[in-house]
Structures are given as structure tokens and as C-alpha cells.
Amino acid sequence: MNTLLTKREGIGFGVVFFILLVVMPVAEATKLIDPFTLNTWGKYLCYAILAISVDILWGYTGLLSLGQALFFTLGGYMMGMHLMLMIGKLGQYKSDLPDFLVFLGHTSLPTIWKPFYSFPFALLMVILLPGLLAAVFGFLAFRSRIKGVYFSILTQALTYGAALLFFQNDMLMGGNNGFTDFRTLLGMDLRSPGGQRSLYLATGLLLLCIFLFCKWLTITKFGLIQRAVRDSETRVLFSGYSAANFKLFVFVVASVIAALGGMLFVPQVGIINPSEMNTEHSLEAVVWCAVGGRGTLIGPIIGAVSVNILKSWATRAYPDWWLIILGVTFILVVLFMPRGIVGLPDQIKGLLNRMKRKPSETAEIPTAIAP
């Protein structure tokens, strides 16, 4: 009978999330770590949610999507619209309208913006818009039996097209500058240590819920078919299952997961613009999965956090070398750590066992008797 977590996984999982959800917030509240550090880790956890969305597609279904940054950014924009309206007259132009709309010559709030005064509506759109886009795109792609590298290229093209669209001022989404200068969310001061601590805890709890949901999904009958699609889609079709429907469902779920990560990313970072849709961000998420260990769920979390810690250090110490460091890391992982950081202990154990067997096998070879 399948269990959600093995004893070993449960212990490791409990320790990690106890540190993230209890130790770090308490350390920040007692001044052992500064608010900036906690805020940085909140950003890492948002990236971990994005990495899980990539893993549930690539690691478990065999769909390498290069468009997850699009859904991540869309979720951020939906929440950003609500946050911009909460600024009120505290903006540069002392108007009820967001500053960029005043700059563009608008005297009244556009119709599409008005419902975003409501936080529940903004939350609904965080889920609905990316999910609907993924459903339409996935339906057309999977019904046409597009897969492999062609699917990756199409998702990349979709992301690039959306970025070009959002860069235009006519979209009423802030153009090149996007949204920034957020002040409050649900009456909470986003710039205060308490506000940032609350957002960090919300991100950690969301990551926990998403991990457990995806873990549960992978041990169900659906998860078995999901992995069967990854290993041999033709066999799944001959078994009478509609592989296109399974892939469409996973694609929509992954898009919503990425959007939820983007929703909490925006108030913690304080800005959202079309550059977040760049293909390099989707590629970085793929690297996170590979480094941590794809097809494990916990691996992408470890990969996202570890690679971004490395990035924070490298962009300060060697800013011109960061992309080279990232590329070399990915190549080394593919060549020497195919199962990522998560699989490294078993890989070392297997190597040691093989080294132990070789001397014993050599000793057992009988010596030839001289005539």
C-alpha cells in the first residue's frame, strides 16, 4: 500500500519544514537574523514553488515546459493589480489611479481594473487566468500530439509573445516598468518586518501544502498513469487511456501552482514587470530541478534554494561569470549527478559497494597451476 511519505522522507521533510516555518521566523523576530535575510528566503521559497511546477511536468510526465515563468508572472500581475489599487493617494501623483495610468493621461480607472479592488477577485484571477490560458494552449497542443522538443519550443514561443505584449503600454499593465511601490495588503504594511514575516510564513505554508498535494497526486492511480505517459506514451494509448487528457490536466495544475508562487513573490520582492517572463527564468527553473533531482518533488525545492544561494553569492563576487557558473553546474550535474543532489547519497553508496566488490572478486579468482 502506497504511503504519502516513507519514514526516512517524513523525518527529513519534518526537519526541513520545522527549520523553515518555525526556526527562521523565530530567529528573525528575536533579531538573530535580519528581516532582509528572511525576505530573501521568502523569495527562494517562491522559486521552490515554481520549481515544483516544472518537476510535476518534466520529472513525472516527461513534458519539458519552457513557459512556466509566464504563469508565474501572470499570477504576480494579478496580485500586483490589487496591490497597485491599495496604494491610493500615497503615490507620486497623489491620485486614486496608479501612477503609470496618470502618466499615460488616464483620468478614470479602466474597466478591467475596477474588480481588482476586491482581494478575493484578485485571488480568483491568480488561479483562473493562468489556468484558462494553460487549458486552451494545452488542448490545442496535446490534441495535435505535439510533444518532445516541439512542445518545449511552443511554450517558449508563447512566453516570448506574452512578454512582448506586456511590454506595450496599451496593455495597461505598466509597460516596461511594470508595477512597484506596493504599500499594504489586507491592511498589513508590506514594508514592515511583521508584514514581511507574515508573507514568509504564508509562502512556507503554501509550499508545504503544494508539496503534500503533489506527493499525494503521484501515489494515486493518476500518478501511475502520469509516469507511464512519461516512460511510454504509446503503451498508455494502447491500454485505452487518453494520454492527451492526462497531460492537459497536469499542465493546468502546474500552471496554477506556478501562478500561486508568483502571487506571493510580488509583495515580497516589491516589483513585477515583463522581464520576469524571460525564457532564461524558465530555463533556470529547469536547472533547479536537474540540480536538486527531478522526479522527486523535494529535489526541486533543494535545487531552487541551493542554486539561488549560489546565484546571490556569485552575482556579487563574480557578476560577469554567473551564467558560465550556472551552465557549468548544469553540465556537471547531467554528466556526473543524473539524479541530482537528492540522489547523491545513494549514488555514493553504490559507488562504494562496487569498489568493495572488485577486490573481493579479484581475490576469488583461482591461480593457474603451473604444469
Image (cartoon, rainbow, N blue to C red):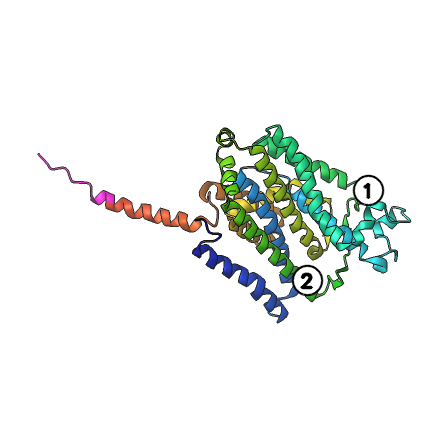
Q: Quadrant of the C terminus?
A: top left
Q: Is residue 149 above or below residue 345?
A: above
Label of residue 169 in the image? 1
Count neighbours of disc 1 (C-alpha within 10 A) and say few if under 14, some if 14 to 19, many if 20 or more.
some
Closer to the camera in the image, 79 or 326: 79
- Extent of the magenta region: 361-371
Determine which residue is flagged by label 2.
196
Residue type at numbered disc 1: Asn
Q: Is residue 40 left or right of residue 168?
A: left
Q: Quadrant of residue 208?
A: bottom right
Regarding residue 313, the answer to whether it shows in the image is no
Residue 87 image offset from top left, x and y in percent: 81, 58
Of all residues, the one furthest to the left in this rendering is: 371
Q: Is residue 7 left or right of residue 104?
A: left
Q: Is residue 286 left or right of residue 79?
A: left
Residue drawn at (51%, 36%), measured in percent from left and top?
230
Closer to the camera in the image, 37 or 263: 263
